Image (spheres, helix red, strand yellow):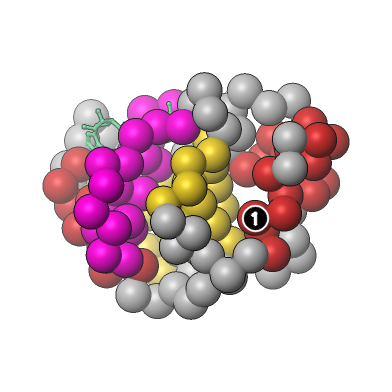
Amino acid sequence: MAIFISRGAADTQAFGESYSKTLNGGDVVVLKGEMGAGKTVFCKGLAKGLGIKDEILSPTYAYMNDYGGKLFHFDCYRLKNGAQAEALGLTDYFYADGICVIEWAQNIAEVLPPDVKSVVIEKTGKEERRIIYE
Ligand SMILES: Nc1ncnc2c1ncn2[C@@H]1O[C@H](COP(=O)(O)OP(=O)(O)OP(=O)(O)O)[C@@H](O)[C@H]1O
Ligand SMILES: [Mg+2]
């Protein structure tokens, strides 16, 4: 476990970019943090680090955006439970070759794979964030 202190959105994005270099295909990253913590900002950097050129948009309504099979970006905010994720076919992606990064993963905790990597973003100020990662 390690800690990174971010002092603004650009910092969090740059951190996501460097964090992406620690990932391998098939990894599942759960991102925790309150609304507005910077989870999506982190994902933008992560995608950039993976060489993805598309703009990363919050998948709140789609639940998951697929970036060429390389990155699957989930937002489970509107899911009630793991069964819903299963029914939508979302859980299959956890066992695919791409990297999964999941916002609001706690909503579907029962269906997450056992060996996820966790990134927690804590709001410690207006622009300061404490990022705890492994
Ligand atoms: N240090 C920081 N890191 C990340 N974002 C920051 C930081 N300081 C300020 N911000 C701002 O906080 C907001 C974070 O928004 P973002 O959409 O990434 O949050 P989120 O955690 O994905 O929220 P949600 O749960 O609603 O999806 C942005 O408007 C960003 O500019
Ligand atoms: Mg978000």
Q: Quick one: label 1, few (<14), some, or many (20+) residues within 10 Å?
A: some
Q: Amino acid at mark 1?
A: Tyr
Q: Is residue 65 left or right of residue 5?
A: right
Q: Is residue 118 left or right of residue 122?
A: right
Residue at 68% in and 44% down:
90
Is residue 14 shown to the viewer in this render? yes
Q: Check the image and report above or below for 119 versus 102.
A: below
Residue at 41% in and 46% down:
121
**Image spot of residue 64 (x, y percent):** 54, 39
Front one among 6 and 111 = 111
Q: Is residue 42 magenta?
A: yes
**Image spot of residue 26 (x, y percent):** 58, 70
Q: Is residue 10 left or right of residue 36?
A: left
Is residue 12 shown to the viewer in this render? no
Q: Which residues are magenta?
A: 34-59
Front one among 49 and 120 = 49
Residue at 27% in and 47% down:
54
Q: Say which element carries label 1.
A: helix
Q: Quadrant of the rendered structure where residue 94 is?
A: bottom right
**Image spot of residue 66 (x, y percent):** 48, 48
Q: Which residue is the site of mark 1?
A: 93
